[in-house]
Image: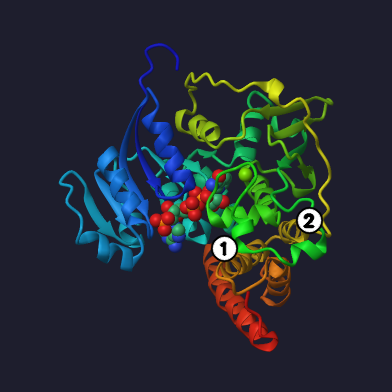
Amino acid sequence: LPENTVLEKGIAILGSTGSIGTQTLDVIENSDSKFRVVLLSGHSNWHLLFSQIKKFRPKYAVITQKAAFDEAKNNFKEKHTSLLFGTEKLLQLLKLNEIDTVLHALVGFAGLEPLVHSILHKKQILLANKESLVVAGEYIMALAKENKVEIIPIDSEHSAIFQCLKNEKRDTVEKIILTASGGPFLHYSEQELQHIKPKDAIKHPIWDMGKKVCVDSAGLMNKGLEVIEARWLFNIPTEKIDVLIHPQSVVHSLIQFNDGRLRAQMGPPHMQYPIRYALHYPFQEENCTDFAFINFPELTFKQVDRKKFRNLALAFYAIEKGGNLPAILNAANEVAVQAFLEHKWPFYRIPELVEEMMAVQPYILNANLEIYLETTKKCFADSWAYIRKHNKNNGYSH
Ligand code: NDP
Ligand code: MG
C-alpha cells in the first residue's frame, strides 16, 4: 500500500463457508490492512460459520438454509454477533451503511438476487459468483453503470483480464484469450468419460474449489460460463473471445491488442492472489511469495476439442444467440451437476441435458430480470423432470 494509506473497509462476505469465502477470510486474517468483517453468510455449514464468527466477530451472521438455522440457533452463544435466518434478511442487511464492500461468493443462481441488491445499495462489488452474470449479465452491467458501482472480478481469468486492461483503451482489444487448465479428464477418451464418478470429478488437479465449480471445470462448462462472464464484464463481443488449454495454469489469461502486442497476467495458480487483488483494489498489498518461475520451464497452450467437450460449444452458442438462452444453459447445467453429484445423472450426459433444454425452453430475445428469473425456475423444474423420465426409461443409477 502507498505510505499513510489505511484501508478501512467494512466488508460483507456472502458464502463465507465456501471455498472462496474461506480463502477470503484467510487473506483478511493475514493482511496488514484493516478490514472490518461486518457480515458473514453460510447456507448449511453452520459449524464452520460458528468458528468464523468466533474469530472475526462480525456484527451479523446469516444462515440461509432453514434446517441448518434451526439447529444452529439452539447452539449459538456469542454476544457480539446477531445470528439471523434467510435470504430476505440477507438482502435487507446489504443496505447497512457500515458495509462498503460485498464479496459475492455464493454458488449458482442463488447469487443473482443478492448481487442486484448490493448494486442497488451502491456497494463496491467483489464478484466470484459467475452464474449471476451468465444468467443476467447485460442487466447487471447496465444496473452497475446506472448506480456507478464498480465490479471487481475474483475469477482468476477475469482478474487477469481486468489487470491487463489497465491503462489500455478498450477499443484496441483485438482478442481476449481465456486460459483453461483442462481439468482432470483432459486426456480421457470419449469411452473413458462415460465412467466418471463424482469423487473423480471433485478432485481438481490444480485448483482447490467447491464441488460445482470442480464438475463445471471437468467438463469445460466452467470455461463456457467464463466466456459469458467475460463478454459482459468487459463489454466485448463474443467473437473476440477465445479459449486455450494451458494445463500449468500460470498464465491466467491474456489480451491481444490491435497493434500486435499481447499482454498476459501470470502468477502462482492460487485463488488467494485474485482475492487479495480484489480486496485491496485500487491499492496493492505487498506480499512477496516464494513462487519460482523456473519451476515451470514449459508453458504449453492448445486448442480445446469442442466436440469432446461439447459444453464449451453450447456456451458459445448460447451467448451468440443471447436473450434468455444463457439463463437456460445455466439452469440446466446447475441441475445436471447436482444430479451427477447425487448419482442421478452420468457426467458424460450433462451436455445432452443442457442442449435439450436449450432446444425446448421458450427462447426470448428481449429479456429482462423477471424473464431471467422465470426462465431459470421453469428450466430447473423441467430439467429435473427430464432426468426423472430418462432414468425411469433406462433404469439408470450409478
Ligand atoms: P462452494 O460450494 O465452496 O461455496 C458456496 C457458498 O455458497 C457456501 O458458503 C455455501 O454455504 C453457499 N450456498 C450454497 N448454496 C446456497 C444457497 N442456495 N443460498 C445461499 N447460499 C448458498 O463454492 P465456491 O466457493 O467454490 O464458488 C463460489 C462461486 O465462486 C461460484 O460461482 C464459483 O463458480 C466461483 N468461483 C470459484 C472459484 C474457486 O476456486 N472455488 C474460482 C473462481 C470462481 P454452505 O457451504 O454453508 O452450504
Ligand atoms: Mg476461473
Mark 2, secondary structure of its residue: loop
* Earlier sequence position, callout 2 versus callout 1: 2
Q: Quadrant of the C terminus?
A: bottom right
Q: Is residue 267 visible?
A: yes
Q: Is residue 210 above or below residue 254?
A: below
- Read off the residue under disc 1: 368
Q: Nearer the viewer, residue 352 or 319?
A: 352
Q: Is residue 243 left or right of residue 331?
A: right
**What number is the disc on residue 270?**
none
The answer to whether the residue bearing label 1 lies less than 8 angstroms from the nearest atom of ligand 1 is no
Q: Is residue 193 above or below residue 289?
A: below
Quarter of the picture for ligand 2? top right
Q: Nearer the viewer, residue 205 or 94?
A: 205
What is the spatial separation of the Cα atoms under label 2 and label 1, in whole angstroms? Answer: 40 Å
Nearest to viewer (mark 2 / mark 1): 2
Q: Is residue 257 above or below residue 357?
A: above
Q: Position of residue 284 (x, y in %)?
A: 49, 22
Mark 1, secondary structure of its residue: loop
Q: Position of residue 241 (x, y in %)?
A: 76, 44
Name the image quarter holding residue 336. bottom right
Crowding at dot 2, Cα within 10 Å, few <14 / some 14-19 / many 20+, comes out as: few
- Read off the residue under disc 2: 188
Q: Is residue 207 left or right of residue 26?
A: right
Give the residue displayed 21% in from the left and 47% down from the top.
81
Q: Is residue 26 left or right of residue 205?
A: left
